Amino acid sequence: MRPIFYPETFDTIIRGGTVVNHDGRGIADIGIRGGKIAAIGDLSTFDAGQTLNAKGLHVLPGVIDTQVHFREPGPTHKENLEAGSRGAVLGGVTGVFEMPNTNPTTSTAQMLEDKLRRANGRMHCNHAFYVGGTHANADHLGDLERLPGCCGVKVFMGASTGDLLIADDEGVSRVLASIRRRASFHSEDEFRLEERRKLARKGDWTSHTDVRDKKTALLSTQRLIGLARQANKRIHILHISTAEELPILAANKDLVTCEVLPNHLSIIGPEAYEIQKGRVQQNPPIRDAKNAAMLWEGVRQGIFDILATDHAPHTLEEKAMPYPASPSGMPGVQTLVPIMLDWVNKGALTLERFVDLVCHGPNRVWGIAGKGRLCVGYDADITIVDLKKTRELRDEDQANISGWTPYHGKTVTGWPTHTIIDGQIIMAEDEVVLEGQGKPYRFSESM
C-alpha cells in the first residue's frame, strides 16, 4: 500500500543512497516534487521525471557555510558573489551567509538591497547577508536585522579586514539593546590588540600569534558574555580559536552559540607559518597542535554549534607581502566538505556530527525556514558525497578569483558529487550544470 501522503509521481527520485538525517543512517530513496522533499523510503514502484543513482553514496542535508566574505562590492579583484558561490556549489555547499565588511559596508537597508540585487541571477547557491553593526546604526539594528535576505547582525569587537568596529562596552551594549534576533561577534579585544601590535616582527608570520594572543580572544569573549548576560540577549561567537575560551562557553550555553573553523582544526602552527607564510595568516590566528587538540575535544563534547569556513580570499601577491603588511584571510568554502570528510574517514569526526554542525546547526541557531534537514516538507537542498573518493586539492581547481587554497597538495578521502538546491541539480561530478539559481534564505520570525 502506498502511503497516503505520497504523490503519484515525482520530479526527481534519488535512488539507493545512504540517507543521513533525523532518523539516523540508512539506505532509502528520496522523492522530490515542486522543489521540496515529498517522500523518503522505498520508492521503487514510483516514477519520476529524472532519476539520480546514489548507490554507494551518502545523501546529506544541504551543507550551509554561515561565514563567508565574497568581497562584493569592494575589492572584487580578490573575490565576488558569482565566483564565491561557484566555489560553494562545486564544494557541495548549498548556501552561505555573507559578511558585511565590504566597501562600502553593508550597514544600511540600501546596501543590503544592493547586495540582494547583485546576487539575483548571479549567485549559484542560496544566500543571506549580514548587516554590520556600527556606532551610527546601533539603535536601528532591531529593524535592519529583520529585513528580507538578512541573516542577522555582525559586530567586530577587534579590527580585522575592513572598517567595521565596535570595541567599547557601551557600543556593544547599544547593539544588544536594539537586537531581537541572535547577533554574531568577531571576539578579539581591540584594546589589547592596540597594545600588542608593536610585537609584530617584520617578515615573521609566527609573530601573528604574539600580536593576537590567546588572552586577546579570552578577554573579549568574557566581556561579551557578561554584556549579553546583563542584556539577556542571545549571541553567536564566531571562529573560536583558543582552548581557554571553551570552559566559559560551556558554562553559558543557555545564552551563547559558537563556531569553529576547519582551519583551526586542520592547520597547525608554527610549522604552517614556516612553510606557507602569509597564506595561512588569518584572524584569529592559526595556533599550535595542543590548542587544536582541545578544539577537537570541544567538537566531541558538543560545545560547538556551527562549523563554517570564514572564506576570505586575498591575492597571492598580497599574501606574499612581508608580515605585518600581509592581509589576514584564506579561501575555504570550496574545501569545507572534502577537508571535513577526510577527518570523518580518519575517525576524528562522525558523519552525523558533521551534519549536525553544517546542516542542523544553522537551522537551529538562525531559524532558516525549510532548510538544514532531510525530511518531508522541507526544501530539497541536498549534498551528495562519496566517502571513498580520494582526490588531491589543488590551487588550479579553485573557483575563487584569487585562485588558491591553503590545502594545495593535500590528498583527501571524501568528496562531494552533487549539489542540489530547491530540487534542481546545480553541480554534478565537479561541473556546475545549472547557474544563477540561488535565492535569499527566509527566516523564522521567532528567532
Image: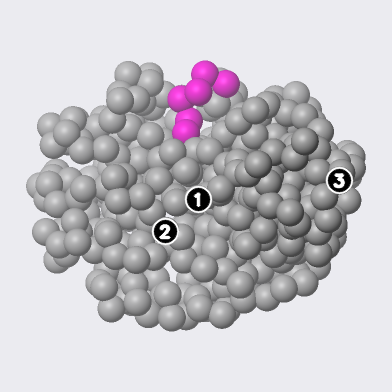
Q: Nearer the viewer, mark 2 or mark 3?
A: 3
Three-letter amino acid code at the position of disc 2 = Arg
In contact (CB < 8 Å): disc 1 and disc 2: yes
The crowding category of the residue bearing disc 3, from other C-alpha atoms within 10 Å (few below 14, some 14 to 19, many at least 20), is: few
Label 3 secondary element: loop
- Left or right of residue 293: residue 113: left
Which of the marked residues, 2 or 3, is nearer the chain's N terminus? 3
- Distance from disc 2 to disc 3, alpha carbons, whole Å, reads 35 Å
Three-letter amino acid code at the position of disc 1 = Gly
Residue 443 seen in render: yes
In the image, is residue 430 above or below residue 175?
below
Asked if residue 407 lies in the magenta stretch, the reply is no
- Left or right of residue 159: residue 390: right
Residue found at x 74% / y 54%: 8
Label 1 secondary element: loop
In the image, is residue 192 above or below residue 394?
above
Residue found at x 36% / y 62%: 150
| Residue 45: mark in rendering | 3
Q: Provide the residue span drawn in magenta.
A: 300-305
Three-letter amino acid code at the position of disc 3 = Thr
Residue found at x 62% / y 61%: 35
Q: What residue is shown with label 2? A: 442
- Distance from disc 1 to disc 3, alpha carbons, whole Å, reads 27 Å
Label 2 secondary element: loop
| Residue 191: mark in rendering | none
Colouring style: one colour
